Image (tube, rainbow, N blue to C red):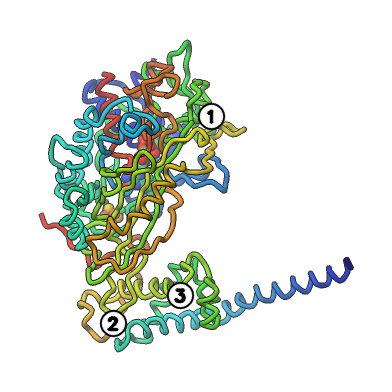
Amino acid sequence: MDDHYEMIVIGSGFGSLFFIKQYLNKKPNAKIAVIEWGENRSHSWQVTNNKNSEFSSSNTHAQDSHHKPWNYTIGLGGGTNCWFGQTPRFIPADFEMKSKFNISDDWPFSYNDLEPYYMAAENIMAISGSDAMGKVSPRSGSFPLPPHRVSAIDEIMMAAQPNLHFPIATARSPLALKNRNQCCATAQCNLCPVNAKFTAHNGLTEILTHPNITYFMNAQAREVIHHNGTASGVMYLTNNAEERSIYGDLIVLGANGIQSPAILLRSGINHPQTGVGICEQLGYEYEVFLNGVDNFGGSTITTGLNYSLYDSHPYREKAGAALFYFENRIKHGLRLEEGRWRQVLPLLVAIEDLPQTSNRVSLNSQGQAYVSHANVSSYARAGLQHVHDNIEKVLAPLPVEKIIPLRERPTESHIQCSLRSGHDANKFVVDGDSLHHKMRNLVVVGSSTFTTCPPANPSLTVAAMSLRAADRLV
Amino acid sequence: MNKSIERRKFLKICAATSIVAVLPLGIYVLDNESRLCQLVEEILTKHLPGRIILQADIEKFSKDFFIERYDIALKTHIFSVLAPLVRVASGFDEDLHGKIDNLERMILTKFLLNSDFFANDAKKKTIIYNGATSNICRTKNPFAQFLTP
Ligand SMILES: Cc1cc2nc3c(=O)[nH]c(=O)nc-3n(C[C@H](O)[C@H](O)[C@H](O)COP(=O)(O)OP(=O)(O)OC[C@H]3O[C@@H](n4cnc5c(N)ncnc54)[C@H](O)[C@@H]3O)c2cc1C
Ligand code: SF4
């Protein structure tokens, strides 16, 4: 039968493509279909049109207009197009929140279980970073690319806090590669003008052009078809709103943290936790005025990561951990004083949130994804307060003139925990191998499956989890 | 309560409000470009004392700046017609970060980054405006230093 595939994958972002990559490593002859809602938009189309896709996030899901916005790309490559390429790993404690801090839940696998796949994902994306980072996120090998040049500020911080301050881990290449140019610190990474960061288009072309894969573009997956607890296909809508179906033995759901739960809800694959817990980090911006140290001399937009309130966070039982991003981009402007133009540090802090049952993805009366997210948790709020209380201590090695708290960021553009993974089939939607607890030939990939919401960026972990899931399945 | 008096009062308030609202728009349409340019010149002169910038460069820069930042052109214009004391007290608006300081930083930063200033180690007396950068590279960083293979 022509429309029967060994595997049907919904979506083509981080979760989907890394799963396919590992699957094909093990089964190179597998016949695969990918159902993708968006278009195939090349890097040059995106730069010329000043957008990643013709879809806007706000048109593809509904929500209360007073609630925070959510940001994602609908199109071939998904979030690999619009992301900024920040790729810190999580730290071991992130996977053991319950056992270590009596907070939320443990993940169904450990950091050590994921480590080989972190290595593999870093190699696939040619990640740049310093092996010193192994002090917080242990490593079995070196980063494939050397670290970026850091700023003078990072140098001071690294000398004073060698176990807590590191050059950024990033998919923005510090050197020209065969398929990517050198990052030139222009700070437009969602539309990188020089094609310096990893994207599906420059780093996974072999998957996007693979002869065994049929891509159905402009195809909005609506439902997973299933009978007697087994998934058998996908029903999708074409551009002309025609309903079509294709069939397969294994279904991989990799839409995003909003669309994946909506597809499950429309399909009637009823797990009470579907869509429950959607969250992301709470972001906050500061500006720090310095005495006599010039910033902006590093080679990319963010040059340093500080783990003072993350790895060695003594109050993680009570307050969310925080990761500091030392910015090398002239975000709030130069200073006005003659000769002191560069003595300023834009600082971004991402604070861990927790999945809450009050925040969820459901369906509206038209069957469209509807996000209710009224508030971040009191745990995240306590984390922000902890940052306010301790920022002076964190920045003590620097000649600080004044620290200006600026604002909370509306979104970190990460969508997590809406189909959480865990061992307990009643409490979690997917298991430790990314299989749906109620349907054993349905794999769910992507940041929706995160159990908790650590402060570090999610996509490297999404990629590593997909590589692991495919490895364990095949 | 006398309803007709209340209504008259209400109409008066409406009329007054609309005059106040329309006035800056009118002024904006009439003398927008030169007003904004004058404000830009004041800011650059204040923060770059002793430097020379050609009038034509200031005009060109001002035009380019407010084409790119069309979103703040009208607000800046209203801002520029307010008396300095009112400007600071008004707290004005979030996008200008509530303070004239931030508007000044925005303008000074954009001008310096798009000029030959830093390329000449901030040493030359005369600053030449290079023209607007492409929309894509909005915040290029002239201080960045790169790895060499
Ligand atoms: C501006 C921006 C900057 C970011 N920067 C970073 C960063 O620096 N570091 C980092 O780690 N993360 C970053 N992220 C987050 C990152 O993009 C996501 O974490 C990541 O893409 C999640 O992977 P995913 O596979 O879950 O979803 P996605 O990558 O979003 O993939 C979902 C795929 O499903 C498709 N799809 C959706 N619905 C349907 C449907 N109904 N039918 C068919 N196809 C569908 C989409 O088109 C897409 O291809 C950023 C995000 C944004 C928006
Ligand atoms: S900083 Fe500039 S060159 Fe580097 S990845 Fe971002 S947009 Fe591309």
Whether the residue under disc 1 has CB within 8 Å of ligand 1: no
Q: Chain of mark 2?
A: B
Which residue is label 3 attached to? B100
Which residue is label 1 attached to? A242
Q: What is the C-alpha distance between the residues marked 3 and 1?
A: 55 Å
SS at circle 3 = helix
Q: Is residue B72 above or below residue A212?
A: below
What mark, if any, has residue A379 been given in the picture?
A: none
Whether the residue under disc 2 has CB within 8 Å of ligand 2: no
Q: Are marks 2 and 1 in contact (CB under 8 Å)?
A: no
Residue sitting at x 25%, y 60%: A396
Q: Chain of mark 3?
A: B
Q: Position of residue A402 (x, y in %)?
A: 33, 67
Q: Position of residue A183 (x, y in %)?
A: 23, 55
Quadrant where the C terminus of chain A sits is: top left
| Amino acid marked by disc 2 | Ile
Q: Can residue A216 be seen at all in this image of the molecule?
A: no
